Image (tube, rainbow, N blue to C red):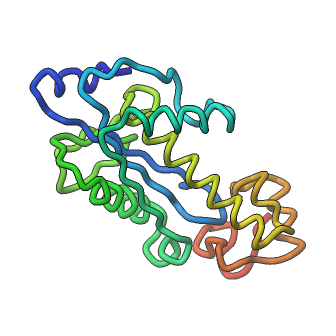
């Protein structure tokens, strides 16, 4: 998982891996993480965050925090997502996460997203091919899950702790029953104009 980092590390360059969590949900924010691993870090996770259990992600999160040179994060909420669309919101979150690093870097590896203004290598399934990207994926996912668990306490009838805002059958049923909250993304096709479309 370091084949894409290695050529840069061998040139003495620092790589920032970037990924997001929350592109597809009907509710909640998109969360991005950018992080820098020490050059020549040996792989210590073997899959992206989506293939880990919640407990495995939490354990990996703590390990990543102990190894990373710097970690930056950013949250873009549903209001902004509705205003600028999810694609722009993802880029905005990623750029803010890079700014939050507060540490110099030379190259950015992302999961498919091309970030203008950076020496950026967007990889298809980058969170499966790049250790830096995979680690960023874990951090973003853990932080977003925690945010949605908080929203579960605010809106317990929506069961956000279970589905995290994703368009599961249960979530759709709950929207039919209770309507929308202020954290639902009204611009998403299935929620637009106050219709569920389910």
Q: Quadrant of residue 32 in the image?
A: bottom left
Q: Quadrant of residue 9 in the image?
A: top left
* Total numbered circles: 0
- x, y percent for residue 102: 25, 55
Q: Is residue 119 above or below residue 198?
A: above
Q: Residue furthest left?
A: 11
Query: In the figure, is residue 153 to the left or right of 173?
Result: left
Q: Is residue 138 above or below residue 157?
A: above
- x, y percent for residue 129: 40, 26
Query: In the figure, is residue 65 to the left or right of 98?
Result: right
- x, y percent for residue 135: 44, 36
**Residue name at image x 39 percent, y 36 percent:** 133
**Residue name at image x 22 percent, y 50 percent:** 103
Pick the front one: 196 or 53: 53
**Residue name at image x 11 percent, y 28 percent:** 12
> Is residue 96 visible in this depiction of the protein?
yes
Pick the front one: 127 or 13: 13
**Residue name at image x 38 percent, y 32 percent:** 67
């Amino acid at each position: 998982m370091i084949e894409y980092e290695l050529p840069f590390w061998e040139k003495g360059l620092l790589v920032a891996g970037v990924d997001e969590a929350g592109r597809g949900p009907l509710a909640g924010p998109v969360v991005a993480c950018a992080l820098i691993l020490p050059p020549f870090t040996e792989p210590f996770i073997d899959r992206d965050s989506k293939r880990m259990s919640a407990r495995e992600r939490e354990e990996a999160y703590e390990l990543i925090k102990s190894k990373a040179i710097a970690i930056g994060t950013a949250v873009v909420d549903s209001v902004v997502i509705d205003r600028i669309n999810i694609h722009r919101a993802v880029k905005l979150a990623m750029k803010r996460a890079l700014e939050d690093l507060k540490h110099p870097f030379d190259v950015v590896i992302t999961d498919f997203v091309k970030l203008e203004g950076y020496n950026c290598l967007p990889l298809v399934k980058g969170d499966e091919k790049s250790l830096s990207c995979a680690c960023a994926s874990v951090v973003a996912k853990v932080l977003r899950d925690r945010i949605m668990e908080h929203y579960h306490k605010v809106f317990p009838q929506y069961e956000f702790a279970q589905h995290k805002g994703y368009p599961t059958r249960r979530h759709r049923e709950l929207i039919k029953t209770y309507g929308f909250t202020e954290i639902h993304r009204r611009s998403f096709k299935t929620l637009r104009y106050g219709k569920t479309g389910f």
